[in-house]
Structure formats: structure tokens, C-alpha cells
Image (cartoon, helix red, strand yellow):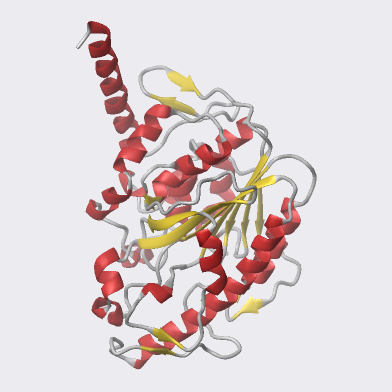
């Protein structure tokens, strides 16, 4: 091997090692102008804003979403996810490794926005660290802002929950629309319907001409699961109690309603003249406290920290493929889809870690979370 090649390999190794050190500490700084920086030594390296085409980006983090029909032990009286499956096949899609089960939605938000594994930080939730220390955090939102995007967060729940009103601005999100900003939203059980939520996304998307990044966190299918108007009947020999059966029937019925609204939303996206990328994924599974899950092959095979995703391009420029990823990789999938320059050292670390890395990490336990004071409610 020639000497210059040896030096290139050595340099690449040093960058990788330094990057791992940065990531393991959990946070990457952003400069005062909003463009992200990555610290790989004593000096910070700025990401140079690119000049990509005008592309709107919509991220929909769907509450407790999985393709429940993949659980072979369950039989449904009605197909709950007809439209989701059609849109999935038109997209890049696959299984998605997530950091939590049954709750702690904010940690999934953190991993998508930053590309950093939540479990690499010494705090139970990212909001605990960011809200207390008031640190700006390197994120997809900051990068898009540096490239001319407006950044908007939408979540039809209390704006103070999980300290989102404090944390979102520190992560580069300029404006936050919470349930307080929804005009008389209708509810599905205890939670604001996906219909109202998706309508708000479309309303904001169609305002003005500036490129938009919209980060939407839904809430309709949050436990306790509700069934309206009539539940989908779910049968399974694996059910060990009536509570699990009723819960899964209500859950499948909620997914059916989400499926209808998702189809309406995606058809509206298809009619847009501007290229628009839609990322749809589940933040976590329904809680593993369903005892029947232990008897079902899907959960034995995929574990309790796997959901699904798709990335759709209304202009068909994104390759349609089946690709399993970890949530920490999603940021870089989005950046690649819209052609914005990214930090190659950090990306290389994250992509190398990838999907399988989640099998060997200790995930956050809901019971431990609720013992602490990590939430701020009104």
C-alpha cells in the first residue's frame, strides 16, 4: 500500500474515533447562527449550507404505530391498514429500531431530530438534559434552517408536556403548534383525532412559499385505546386474558381510522406541485405489558423495540426499496433524500452502528421514568 493511502486510512480512523467520543457524550453543539457544527477536535467544523432544490419535508411520528397485521397469531374481522400498505409499497420502507416501548415518545423525537442514540446520554430522557441545561442541540431542524427552511413542530397535546415548549426551540424548531392552538379539535376517545392533526399539517404546509420542515407528533392511538364507532374484532389463540383481547381490538380500530386519514393526507401531498418528502413512522409499539405478546412470534422475532416506517417522494425521485434502519439513521436518510450536505464523519458512525446496534443496548424502562420528575404538566 502506498504511503498516501496509509495516511488516508489513518486519518479516517482518527475521525471515526473522535466522532464516537462526541456521540457517546450525547450532544453536538450548534453555533450562534443556527448552522450545525460537529466537534471532532478542539475546533468546530461548520456544515456548509448547500443549494438543493426546493423540497418540503414532513415528518409524521405516529403514536404507537406498528403493522399489527404482521402478527400472524391475530385474525381481524376487517383489514385495518389497507391504505398504509399501498403507500408503503410506493416508498422506501422497512422495519425501524426505536429506543422505547409503550411510551416516552420524546426519546424517539430526539433520536430522529439529532441522529444521536438516546441511551448514549446519562439522562433518562433528552428533555431532562436539554430543558435543565438550556443547551442548543445539533439537529436536522438546525441544518434545514441553515438551508433556508422554516421549521415547525405540531403536537395536539399540552405544549408543556415533556417540556416541548422549552426544548423544541433549542433543537431548531421556530414555531410550535400544540393542542392549545387547535380550534375546537374533536377527539377519538381521550386524544385529538389524526384527522384534525393531519388537517393542521396541510394547513401549515400550504401557507406561503418558503421551504418547510414540519415535525408532527400524533397522539390519537395513545393508550388507553379507544374503539369508535364499532371495534374491529380480533381473535387469537395466543390471548391469555380478555383485557389483551379488548385492548388489541380497540388498538386495531384506531389504526383503521389512522389508515383512512393517512390515505386522505397522502393524496393531498400527491397533488402538490412542489416536491414533498413524507416520513411516516411509529414512535414505539403498544406496551409490552400485554402478556399475550410473549406468546406471539412477531414479538419473539422482532423484540419490543421495532416499529415500521416509510419515506415517500411525491415526485418519485426516491428509490422504492425495503431497507431496515434504526431511528438514529433516519435523519441522514432524510438529508440524502433532499440532497443537503451532511457531516460525513457523524453519518459514517451512525450508519455503521445501524439497525443491529439496538439489539445490544439497554432501553429505557417506563416504570423508572414515572418514578422521577421528568415531566412538567400544567
The image quarter in which residue 260 lies: bottom right
Vertical placement of residue 325 versus 263, above or below: above
Q: Residue furthest right?
A: 208
Q: Quadrant of the C terminus?
A: bottom right
Q: Residue at x 23, y 13 (%)?
A: 6
Residue 180, visible in the rendered structure: no
Counting the numbered discs, the total is 0
Q: Residue at x 51, y 78 (%)?
A: 80
Q: In the depicted view, which residue is nearer to us: 291 or 332?
A: 332
Q: Position of residue 32 (x, y in %)?
A: 58, 26
Q: Position of residue 83 (x, y in %)?
A: 57, 70
Vertical placement of residue 72 versus 240, above or below: above
The image quarter in which residue 266 lies: bottom right
Q: Residue at x 57, y 78 (%)?
A: 190
Q: In the depicted view, which residue is nearer to us: 98 or 43?
A: 98
In the drawing, does residue 92 fall left or right of residue 175? left
Residue 53, visible in the rendered structure: yes
In the drawing, does residue 116 fall left or right of residue 238? right
In the drawing, does residue 293 fall left or right of residue 228? left
Q: Position of residue 26 (x, y in %)?
A: 36, 39
Q: In the depicted view, which residue is nearer to us: 92 or 302?
A: 92
Vertical placement of residue 198 versus 117, above or below: below
In the drawing, does residue 262 fall left or right of residue 135? right
Q: Quadrant of the N terminus?
A: top left
Q: Residue furthest top?
A: 3
Q: Position of residue 247 (x, y in %)?
A: 43, 84
Q: Residue at x 49, y 35 (%)?
A: 138
Amino acid at each position: 500500500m502506498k504511503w498516501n493511502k496509509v495516511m488516508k486510512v489513518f486519518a479516517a480512523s482518527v475521525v471515526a474515533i473522535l466522532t464516537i467520543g462526541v456521540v457517546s457524550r450525547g450532544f453536538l453543539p450548534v453555533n450562534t447562527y443556527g448552522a450545525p457544527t460537529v466537534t471532532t477536535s478542539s475546533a468546530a467544523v461548520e456544515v456548509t449550507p448547500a443549494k438543493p432544490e426546493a423540497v418540503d419535508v414532513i415528518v409524521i411520528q405516529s403514536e404507537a404505530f406498528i403493522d399489527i397485521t404482521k402478527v400472524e397469531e391475530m385474525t381481524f374481522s376487517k383489514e385495518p391498514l389497507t391504505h398504509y400498505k399501498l403507500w408503503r409499497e410506493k416508498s422506501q420502507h422497512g422495519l425501524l429500531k426505536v429506543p422505547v416501548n409503550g411510551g416516552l415518545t420524546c426519546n424517539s423525537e430526539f433520536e430522529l431530530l439529532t441522529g444521536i442514540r438516546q441511551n448514549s446520554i446519562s439522562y433518562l430522557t433528552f428533555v431532562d438534559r436539554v430543558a435543565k441545561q438550556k443547551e442548543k442541540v445539533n439537529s436536522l431542524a438546525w441544518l434545514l434552517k441553515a438551508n433556508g427552511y422554516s421549521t415547525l413542530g405540531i403536537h395536539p397535546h399540552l405544549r408543556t408536556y415533556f417540556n416541548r415548549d422549552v426544548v423544541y426551540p433549542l433543537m431548531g424548531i421556530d414555531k410550535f403548534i400544540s393542542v392549545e392552538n387547535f380550534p375546537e379539535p374533536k377527539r377519538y376517545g381521550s386524544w385529538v383525532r389524526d384527522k384534525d392533526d393531519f388537517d393542521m399539517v396541510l394547513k401549515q404546509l400550504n401557507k406561503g412559499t418558503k421551504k418547510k420542515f414540519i415535525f408532527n407528533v400524533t397522539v390519537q392511538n395513545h393508550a388507553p385505546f379507544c374503539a369508535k364507532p364499532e371495534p374491529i374484532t380480533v381473535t387469537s389463540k395466543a390471548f391469555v386474558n380478555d383485557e389483551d383481547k379488548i385492548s388489541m381490538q380497540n388498538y386495531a380500530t384506531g389504526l383503521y381510522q389512522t389508515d383512512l386519514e393517512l390515505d386522505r393526507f397522502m393524496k393531498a401531498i400527491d397533488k402538490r406541485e412542489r416536491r414533498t418528502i413524507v416520513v411516516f413512522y411509529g414512535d414505539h409499539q403498544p406496551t409490552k405489558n400485554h402478556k399475550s405478546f410473549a406468546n406471539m412470534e412477531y414479538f419473539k422475532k422482532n423484540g419490543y423495540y421495532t416499529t415500521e416506517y416509510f419515506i415517500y417522494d411525491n415526485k418519485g425521485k426516491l428509490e422504492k426499496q425495503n431497507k431496515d434502519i434504526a431511528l438514529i439513521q433516519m435523519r441522514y436518510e432524510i438529508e440524502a433524500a433532499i440532497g443537503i450536505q451532511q457531516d460525513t464523519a457523524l453519518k459514517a458512525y451512525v450508519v455503521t452502528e445501524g439497525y443491529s446496534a439496538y439489539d445490544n443496548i439497554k432501553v429505557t424502562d417506563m416504570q423508572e421514568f414515572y418514578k422521577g420528575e421528568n415531566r412538567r404538566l400544567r
